[in-house]
């Protein structure tokens, strides 16, 4: 089966990446985790992206904070779908990373999720794979059904508490 690439700009992005890794484990989809900075090791980041398709990857998820150029730098070197996750740093509430990730020039798209949106990044990657893999599509339907059941159970609880 095809793999998802989980690429972090720094080890310090791991708490956000773990949200994605948890989802990918839950779905049992193969993935690989790398730490490759667009700024501190640009040659290695470029080489990874340029060889990702032949390396068996179908989608890349990039986690980076501050001047978050990792998703864009990967996208510049592959036509695989790249999902960018802006990570909140110590200042500016993640707006720095959000704008750096989302404001890509025309021709080089990055599908950007919310600041610290690791779970949605994994789900979006799975949805991309689910366009051609029926078992992943069915697992996504089951995941949605679980989310719906949790909300309806919470609704039932508050209604009984506050009637
Ligand atoms: C970015 O700079 C990384 O993705 C990280 O979010 C941020 C800070 O990196 P460290 O100084 O913690 O390694 O490139």
Image (spheres, rainbow, N blue to C red):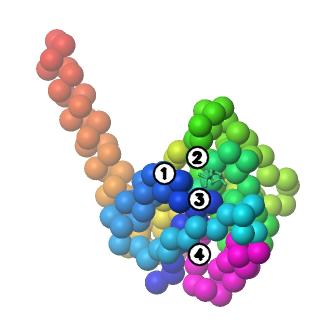
- Write the start and end of the magenta stretch as one range: 43-61
Q: Is residue 54 magenta?
A: yes
* Residue carrying label 3: 10
Identify the residue under disc 1: 16
Regarding residue 140, the answer to whether it shows in the image is no
* Residue at mark 3 to residue at mark 4: CA–CA distance: 22 Å
Could you tell me how many numbered marks the image carries? 4
Residue located beneath label 4 in the image: 58
Q: Is residue 146 left or right of residue 81?
A: left
* Res 158 → quadrant: top left
Mark 2 vs ligand 1: CB under 8 Å? yes
* Label 1 to label 2: alpha-carbon separation: 7 Å
Label of residue 145 in the image: none
> Disc 4 vs disc 1: Cβ atoms closer than 8 Å?
no
Real-space CA distance between mark 4 and mark 1, rounded to the nearest whole angstrom: 21 Å
Q: Indicate the position of residue 50 as horizontal and vertical percent values.
A: 73, 79
Query: In whole angstroms, how far apart are the C-alphas of marks 3 and 1?
Result: 11 Å
* Dot 2 or dot 3, earlier in sequence: 3
Judged from the image, the secondary structure of the residue bearing numbered disc 1 is helix
Q: Nearer the viewer, mark 2 or mark 3?
A: 3
First along the sequence among labels 1 and 2: 1
Within 10 Å of the Cα at label 3, are there few (<14), some (14-19), or many (20+) other Cα atoms?
some
Image location (x, y in percent) of residue 63: 59, 56
Q: Residue furthest right?
A: 106
Determine whether the beta carbon of the residue marked 3 sits less than 8 angstroms from the nearest atom of ligand 1: yes
Tag 3–tag 4 contact (CB < 8 Å): no
Residue at x 58%, y 67% (from the top left corner): 35
**Circles 1, 2 touching at the beta carbon (< 8 Å):** yes
Q: Which residue is mark 2?
A: 87
Quadrant location of the C terminus in the rendered image: top left
């Amino acid at each position: 089966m095809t793999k998802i690439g989980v690429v972090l700009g720094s080890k310090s992005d791991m708490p956000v990446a773990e949200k994605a890794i948890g989802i990918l484990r839950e779905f049992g989809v193969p993935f690989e985790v790398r730490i490759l900075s667009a700024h501190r090791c640009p040659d290695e980041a470029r080489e990874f992206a340029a060889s990702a398709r032949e390396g068996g990857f179908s989608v890349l998820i990039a986690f980076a904070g501050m001047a978050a150029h990792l998703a864009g730098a990967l996208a510049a070197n592959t036509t695989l779908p790249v999902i960018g996750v802006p990570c909140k740093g110590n200042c500016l509430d993640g707006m720095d990373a959000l704008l750096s990730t989302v404001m890509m020039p025309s021709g080089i798209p990055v599908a950007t999720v919310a600041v610290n949106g690791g779970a949605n990044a994994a789900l979006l990657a799975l949805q991309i794979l689910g366009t051609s893999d029926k078992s992943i599509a069915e697992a996504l339907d089951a995941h949605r059904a679980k989310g719906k059941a949790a909300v309806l159970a919470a609704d039932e609880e508050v209604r009984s508490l506050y009637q």
